[in-house]
Image (spheres, rainbow, N blue to C red):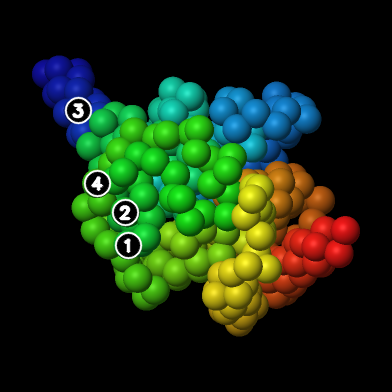
Amino acid sequence: MKHALSTQLRLIAAAVLALAPGPLWAKPDAAGPDRAATEAIVQQCGTTEDFSAPAPPARLFGNTYYVGTCTVSVLLVASPKGHVLVDAATEQAVPSILANIRALGFRPEDVRWIVTSHEHFDHVGGLASLVRATGARVALSAPAAAVIASGKADPDDSQFGSLKNFDVAPVTADRIVTSGSVVQVGPLRLTALLTPAHSTGSTSWSWQSCAGAECRTISYIDSISALAAPPYRFSDHPEVVARFRRTFDAIAARRCGVLVTPHPSVSTLFERMRGEAPLDANDACQNYASRGRGWLDAQLAKEAAEAQK
């Protein structure tokens, strides 16, 4: 009788766990980056520049995990009440993203929201497929929502000359966010900050990632590089230059905590996850903004020099 009751209880427990949204929470002893898993990323990816090259998953900190590709970040923020996916990479990357979520012990169907950085194909090309696979809702800034709903590159984008050949499957936003908007799933609270530099719809996100009582701020700060595809010239668009500079100031004023960028190499994410540099340097946001100013100034100087020829 006792054996039968014990067996029945085990079956009930297994059924309950099967219905739970993956691991119930990050364990206190699983706080920092998984260095072995990060090493696996580095070894598998090598020097590839392919936006869609699959990479294995790795814990970043607490309940935040890297599930993206070798060169494009996608983060899973997990909770007992469901999860949030940050960015969507390319259409070709979707199978590896879903596989990474499952490999960590979570179910894609438990992703409740997807939020994004900016409306370029390498970060939202997989959005439609991920929405279909997860049933998640999508939160976007108004400019990003308009572009993504069209499936076409924004003609006013400084990179339109190179982006115009990369359509994406259209997605309609379920929610429009502005600076200060909060996307909440159970205990998760992701706060938006509009950072319209790299694109007009650029959005950054921050949240607390916890392992037991140990928490860190994670700041997913969008790209701020001033890239131009001919015939676009920043010199011809002072309002765009001013928009960039306002964004730099807004980022520099923040205490980032753990900085993550849409392309992990830009913020040396894997190196920091391997312990080669501090994971959450105090001046991370200030240094990132300073680099952005340098990129913009260099682009303007290049354009001025070309105009003299």
Q: Earlier in the sequence, mark 3 or mark 2?
A: 3
Mark 3 neighbour class, 10 Å CA radius: few under 14, some 14 to 19, many 20 or more = few
> Residue 243 lies in what quarter of the image?
bottom right
Residue 201: assigned label: none
In the rendered image, the residue lying farthest to the front is 309
For mark 3, what is the residue? Answer: 15
Residue type, numbered disc 4? Thr
Question: What is the distance, in whole Å, between disc 1 and disc 2 at their CAs?
Answer: 6 Å
For mark 2, what is the residue? Answer: 146
Question: What is the distance, in whole Å, between disc 3 and disc 4 at their CAs?
Answer: 36 Å
Closer to the eye: label 2 or 4: 2
Q: Give coordinates of residue 44: x percent, y percent.
A: 70, 24
Question: What is the distance, in whole Å, between disc 3 and disc 1 at their CAs?
Answer: 42 Å
For mark 1, what is the residue? Answer: 142
Q: Is residue 283 among what the camera can see?
A: yes
Indicate whether 135 appears above or below 80. above
Q: Earlier in the sequence, mark 2 or mark 4?
A: 2
